[in-house]
Image (spheres, grey):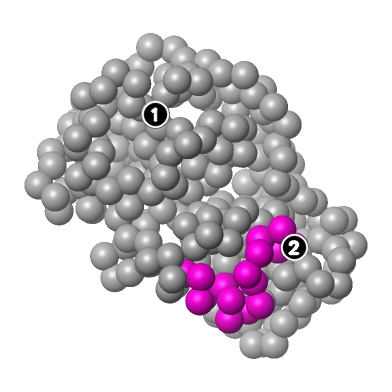
Amino acid sequence: MASPLITADELARILDRGDVRIVDCRWDLANPERAPEEYRSGHLPGAVFASLDDDLTAPVGPGRHPLPTPARFGESLSRLGITPNSRVVVYDDSGGGFAARLWWMLTDQGHEQTSVLDGGIQAWVAGGNSLDMEAVIPPRGGMETRPWTRIVDRDQVVARPEHTVVIDARIAERYRGESEPIDPIAGHIPGAVSVPHPGNLAPDLTLRDPGTLRSRFSEVGVTDAEHVIVYCGSGVTTCLNILAMEIAGIGRPWLYEGSWSDWCSTDLPIATGDAP
């Protein structure tokens, strides 16, 4: 089993290994064309580009970024050159907010040899490492896929046991309902607590140390992930909270796949303000 994180120095030492597959997961929700352009302008040597919309999301499903079927995800893995023997390293330029989505998907599929580059492309460049501009087309990969395991749907969130902790990973303004730049209705799921995903990061966009991360979640009553459901706007950046919880030794919570974009599309109750 690989560590959930890998440093730029550690990656540089294994870069030339034939089993290493690096995946660029940069994305911009407001401007989807930006990430492919930035990939072409410079990416880690040997990195392939994974599109959030095309590779990590289904065309139809709950919320804005539903999970693809395992079979569809398997097709993307083949294109990305990932096999059961691949040592996968994923990165972005936002501290892992998008890379963690692919990390979660691969590890939920049982591919534990997957790590997020701590500090992303910025850490790679800061370490004096070079970038390439040539598009990478790897040999086709392929691995067996299985049903997603650690996910819940809207009905399961509604019917959750009373002792379940629901965590909202969006920034506090969106949680409180003061601002909603993407979804049609502002607010949060009644009973959910706010743990914004950017708070997991140090100023240099690396993940904070395990003790600090553990304290973040213990402040909202979380010491064990088994009875925790996490969500964000569409089930993407909340994966950074999942990554942080694993680093903190708390374990892996349940992902509400459709997240707020699914919840607010119904007539279910909505809360606003600081209180759960």
Which amino acid type is shown beneath numbered disc 1? Arg
Label 2 environment density (alpha carbons within 10 Å; few <14, some 14–19, many ≥20): some
Range of residues picked out in magenta: 213-230
Could you tell me which residue is drawn at 23 percent across and 30 percent down?
15
What quarter of the picture does the C terminus occupy?
Answer: bottom right
Residue at the left extreme?
128
For residue 189, say whether it is visible: yes
Instruction: Between residue 30 and residue 39, name the one nearer to us.
Output: 39
Eyeballing the image, is 275 above or below 133? below
Q: Earlier in the sequence, mark 1 or mark 2?
A: 1
- Mark 1 → mark 2, Cα distance in angstroms: 31 Å
| Quadrant hosting residue 71 | top right
Place of residue 203 in the rendered image (x, y in percent of width and height, measured from the top left): 29, 70
Locate residue 217: give its quadrant. bottom right
Position of 52 relative to 166 (above/below): above
Where residue 136 sits in the image (x, y, percent)?
29, 22
Front-most of residues 71 and 269: 71
Image coordinates for residue 23, horizontal then vertical, percent = 38, 34
Q: Residues within 10 Å of mark 1 (few under 14, many from 20)?
A: many
Q: Amino acid at mark 2?
A: His
User: Looking at the rendered structure, which numbered label has been put on residue 87?
Assistant: 1
Residue 63 seen by the camera: no
Considering the numbered disc 2 on the image, is that residue within a helix, a strand or a loop? helix
Left or right: residue 97 versus residue 191 is left
